[in-house]
Image (tube, coloured by chain):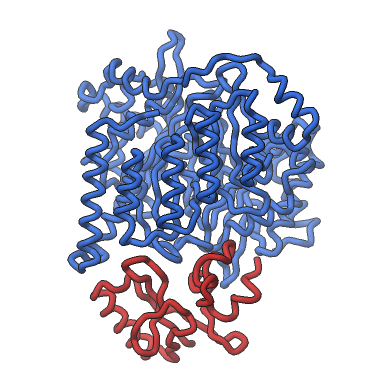
Amino acid sequence: MYRYDEFDAAFVEERVGQFRDQVARRVAGELTEEQFRPHRLMNGLYLQLHAYMLRIAVPYGTLSSRQMRKLAEIARKYDRGYGHFTTRQNLQFNWPALKDVPDILAELGSVEMHAIQTSGNCIRNVTADHFAGAAADEIVDPRPYAEIMRQWSSLHPEFSFLPRKFKIAVNGGPKDRAVIQAHDIGLQVVRNERGEIGFTVYVGGGLGRTPMIGHKIRDFLPEADLLAYTDAILRVYNLEGRRDNKYKARIKILVHEKGAAAMREAVEAEFAAHNREGLTLPPEEIARINAYFALPPLEPKKALSERTERRRLKDAKFSNFLQSNLSPHKVQGYGIVTISLKPIGGVPGDATADQMDAVADLAEEYSSDELRVSHEQNLVLPHVAFDDLPAVYDRLASVGLATPNAGLVTDIIACPGLDYCALATARSIPVAQRLSEHFGDGARARDIGPLKIKISGCINACGHHHVGHIGILGLERAGEETYQITLGGSGDEQAAIGQITGPGFSSENVVDAIETIVSTYMSQRRDGSEDFLSTYRRVGMTPFKEALYERSAGSDI
Amino acid sequence: MSDIITANRLIDGIVLFQDSGGGWAEDFARAAIYADAAATKAALDLAKEDERRDLIVEPYAVAVELRNGHYAPKALRELIRATGPTVRLDLGKQAQGQAPVLLEKPHVSV
């Protein structure tokens, strides 16, 4: 893991001191709310529906046990005993008091964490594939590049007042697990025919009220040019992006209006003309950062663990857990364990302080002290020996974290929605809970197979509904919550925006509507191996639409 | 149409309601009800003075209506804000017996 050097530590400490002073001046009346708001937002502090909300960065989703324990401690000491993991791999506390936030930030600084640039019109926390550094199919660990961009973008004087927020994601394997094509900049790590590392660059992706899939503007960007090229994209955006209309200010609108080819030309011209040498990454600096992310010393083991196989044969729940929550690791005899934060009927992404502590203990004991947060609002133990899987499973089960549903129909992404969020137009979490209760984590869920349902409580799309295989968007119509459904979205390497089925459904009928969609899929699929998205892509919208609006009595036309 | 005035306390962000003395209460039951637009405007002007004195932030008027003999916010957003998360009944005003009466039993159905 990356460790702060003296500069990093001093920088974060200085920022905490500055914010402490800003809060003191705000409370003393020396700063108005209007003056104070940009300062609190740059430190991740929002005013939400019930109280302040503090958004803490988990850079590229990587956490140590010590950091997770600190989050648990903050949850107990300053909040209400829990936290909410988000689709940006961050953690949100929903009830902090303004007067306590400087102390919280100081506590975070003590474990090399902060909340800088988790809000505001700046470059936000750079996200990455949550199996980074562990996945069997990984080309190169994307996290060193995310860390390099974090250092470069932190308080970058030219890019702290962009037209709008700016999100960058990096993916390190052939499977896109970081939804890079729905980001302002998406970087896919690749190797060329000579084996050299580089990036395929996408620009202008984004969700929100105008969803767009990013355009590829470079097939292969040499590793050394990462910052110079990113800088060129930001410069073009900073100059040409719209500042007259908040809703048209994201880079996706610029790329859309300008055209991808013209955007590519502008970026390449800027890249060729400006400061290229000054931002070229020296190989020794890349090597220095890479060293922080070295694979832990894992001794290869037998491909099968007898202990685990014996347990698998006699314990169906354990077997189901391994089937859905264990992914292939790059070292033989190890696996990646996804800890689902989607207990049946629970709140997606929430973890109690006790659960955070339990996960920290497990990471320390069984996963080389490493954890990941996924954009799917789950936690990950990246390096678990097969021999240890029974012990890990038992401990997870004892704290309610062994739900065997990773990647299945009840592994639902949901934004906080109207239960917490000041911007929301409808609730998300209760819909996720009812769908979770409806489909469960048993035989039917396994029969349905891989299926991503994503729910947002407003058009800002924090719940990524546009790229859900089934997307649900909560809106308010005539004082009532109503839910619009989209089908066929995807956030992987074949990214697509979902298509709206038709008129929306009431809160009362939305679960039945999803059941109708799932039943239609089950009747349409060729066999059990054809997953929902493949079936949808083969048969199209028509059978689903017919089932929803012509045969079903449940629609609200 | 009747209104109440709400805001957040600066120091901790807790949701407050203007009471009949022009002060602020955490309990929805103590919210003063303003029966017409002129009364609402006068109350909001008073609240903005407290905003300028840095006691509260973002004061605004919320439409309320009588339901079964008790006032409650008309809009779902405001009902949830005055009550607490519908998915965590142990949090927010509902956990302290400070929510609009309507919502305490039964809770918002989904």
- For the point 26% across and 48% down, the residue is A16
A437 lies left or right of B28: right
x then y, percent, for residue A346: 63, 53
B101 lies left or right of A511: left
- For the point 49% across and 27% down, the residue is A368
Tell me where residue A64 sits by quadrant.
top left
Tell me where residue B12 sits by quadrant.
bottom left
Looking at the image, which is closer to me, A212 or A285?
A285
Looking at the image, which is closer to me, B50 or A200?
B50
- For the point 25% across and 59% down, the residue is A23
A1 lies left or right of A339: left
Residue A317 shows up from this direction:
yes
In red, which chain?
B
In blue, which chain?
A
Q: Does residue A198 lie above or below A97 as drawn?
A: above
| Quadrant location, the N terminus of chain A | top left
| Quadrant location, the C terminus of chain A | bottom right
